[in-house]
Image: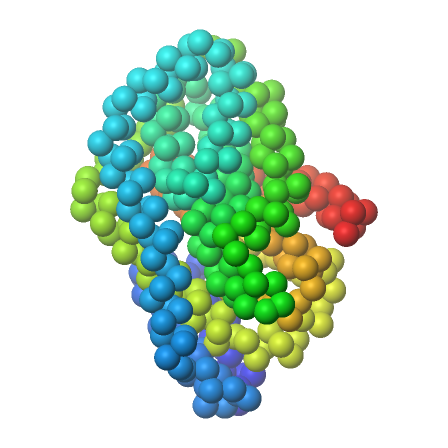
Amino acid sequence: MLEISLLTILLAVLVLPVSLHAVEKNIEAFLLAMGAAAVTVSHYFGPERLWSVHLAGEIFREPVLITAVVFAAGFLILFFKDKITKYILKAEELLGKKLFSFALIVLLGFSSSVITAIMAAILLVEIVSALRYDREHEIKLVVLGCFSIGLGAVLTPVGEPLSTICIAKLRGAPYNADFFFLLKHLSAYVVPGIVLCGAVGAMIAPKGRSDAKTLGEKETENIRDVFIRAGKVYIFIMALILLGTGFKPIIDQYIIKLSSSSLYWINSLSAVMDNATLASAEISPKMELVKIQFILLGLLIAGGMLVPGNIPNIISAGRLKIKSKEWAKMGLPFGFVMMGAYFAVLRYIL
């Protein structure tokens, strides 16, 4: 009964958001309901009583930091957008297109762990909207930028929901994960990936501006949007904590026993499913550090390959009207090359 119920919930979490528009549009509320259902099932049919005062405190406390950063950064970008655009265009003129593309991708990747992946993606949208490259080159720039943002944001728990959930699940023994835990254990792999994204961005940079159709922002933001986005992030983190707690019996029984290599390639599913959701269903403090590293890097790289893979992709594609096929044309080949290269490195080093 326990396994069938949890697998049914897991299947709903993985399939419904990508198959039903109504669920996709209200993904935060949907995941919150599924998380509560998973905890309830495990509470009554599993080996542990999961609903507790401690869990209630955790689901309300953990989202606060990342939500506050999203909220603050949202206001800064909203009120200083014109100045940001002005300085960006000056920088592009000064540096030239190749060096500018490299610097843009790398700086957004590193800054995303501080200003959050969400705000880094919004900055990327604003910058690309101000450029006058041809549409094909702009799409490639956006895809590479989102790969970089997705990688860099994992380095701190304020960077993105995936890192917030990971720290929340590893906060106790044996890892006692603190603010710098992911920076310490993943930076050696993440930094080269960000630089690689920047180098590819420099290589594909156009020679001149274009009079042809370019990307343009679908809509402008207002104060109401800033509040709504921060609220959605808060609910999203709450939902992921509940999902991770509810799926604990399955994690302990099955996922822990899988090899690091198997989990790495299984996580290529992150291309079509939000990587933070998958992380909440996989990460456990009972795992060895090597397995956690394999899981996270697999999720981070695959998450950039298609639009649904992570939040920066969804924001950028939605606001710049990039079609799924256009994203896949760049994202899939680059992502699979990255997956293969990282797998070889991880197998050799770890």
Q: Nearer the viewer, residue 273 or 64?
A: 64
Q: Residue at x 74, y 48 (%)?
A: 346
Q: Quadrant of residue 20?
A: bottom left
- Residue 3 vs 258, above or below: the answer is below
- Give the mark count: 0
Q: Residue furthest right?
A: 348
Q: Residue 42, percent across and down?
A: 48, 84
Q: Quadrant of residue 342?
A: top right
- Residue 187 vs 285, above or below: the answer is above
- Left or right? Give the position of 286 relative to 243: right
- Left or right? Give the position of 228 relative to 129: left
Q: Residue 309, percent across and down?
A: 50, 50
Q: Nearer the viewer, residue 136 or 47?
A: 47
- Residue 124 vs 2, above or below: the answer is above
Q: Residue 127, percent across and down?
A: 37, 26
Q: Residue at x 33, y 62 (%)?
A: 235
Q: Residue 163, percent across and down?
A: 50, 54
**Model colouring:** rainbow
> Is residue 215 in sight in this rendering?
yes
Q: Nearer the viewer, residue 305 or 102?
A: 102
> Is residue 212 in sight in this rendering?
no
Q: Residue at x 69, y 64 (%)?
A: 288
Q: Residue at x 46, y 70 (%)?
A: 243
Q: Quadrant of residue 286?
A: bottom right
